Image (cartoon, rainbow, N blue to C red):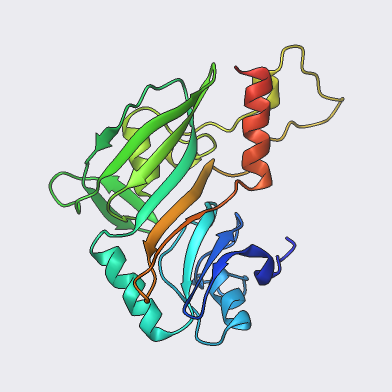
Amino acid sequence: MKVPKFADLILFEDDDLIVVNKPPFIASLDEREGGEINMLRLAKQYTDDAQICHRLDKETSGALIIAKNPEAYRTVSMQFERRKVKKVYHAVIDGTHVFDDLLVDLPILNVGKSSVTISRQDGKRAETWFKSLRYFKHYTLVECRPVTGRMHQIRIHLATQRASIAGDDMYKGQPVFLSKLKRKYTLGKDQEEQPIMKRFALHAYEVAFKLPSGADVNIHAPYPKDFETLLKLLDKFDS
């Protein structure tokens, strides 16, 4: 995989903070195996004291806040703790679903090995709002606004609504193939069809928070190429 130039990912920067548009397939922090490039390492090459203020799943693209000094890190961390950071994600989900500000408030239990489950008994409070943005024949583009920040929260909350994210096999999401959308689609002999997106279709579209100076900032992260391509093809063949 080609490692992007950190400077090319920057959506916002001041003396204290950076917001980048994280590409898919790059972890936010060091993974146990080590060796792999991640956002923290890229950020530290750019500015020595960089700290990642929150995490995005490796496959998830989009807005990621990075602090340039310990004070800025504390300021943003406190906002996350107090649920003061506005986070908006966009996801393409299996099926047509009309979510009109639906609140899913099912507690999530971390069961280890990067796996979570819904547990009313032992889970931690988890709340996500969902709103349908665009309808296709077999899919829906939804806006997801997590209030809390549990691991895999959006993914498992959507799965409980039988609306798994396209391509999210961990939560029964199906990959999107062009042959499913396009009539008379044919592949060459001995060719195996690849899904339109080689990951689950989740993108951190917007973050809004306060800078250490007290000023409000609201950042939108443009869709990466694979997400944009999926929407274009759904528009063309599935609307």
Q: x, y (%) of residue 1?
A: 73, 60
* The quarter of the displayed image where residue 53 is located: bottom left
Q: Residue furthest left?
A: 121
Residue visible at 35% across and 35% down? Answer: 130
- How many marks do you count on the picture? 0
Residue visible at 39% across and 52% down? Answer: 87
Residue visible at 32% across and 27% down? Answer: 100
Quadrant in which the C terminus appears: top right
Q: In screen coordinates, is 180 left or right of 162? A: right
Q: x, y (%) of residue 188?
A: 86, 25
Q: x, y (%) of residue 125?
A: 19, 51
Q: Is residue 198 above or below residue 33?
A: above
Residue visible at 68% across and 45% down? Answer: 225
Give 166 or 46, whichever is nearer the viewer.
Answer: 46
Whether residue 172 appears in this view of the structure is no
* The quarter of the displayed image where residue 237 is located: top right
* The quarter of the displayed image where residue 4 is located: bottom right
Q: Is residue 222 above or below residue 80?
A: above
Q: x, y (%) of residue 182?
A: 71, 17
Q: In screen coordinates, is 70 left or right of 80? A: right
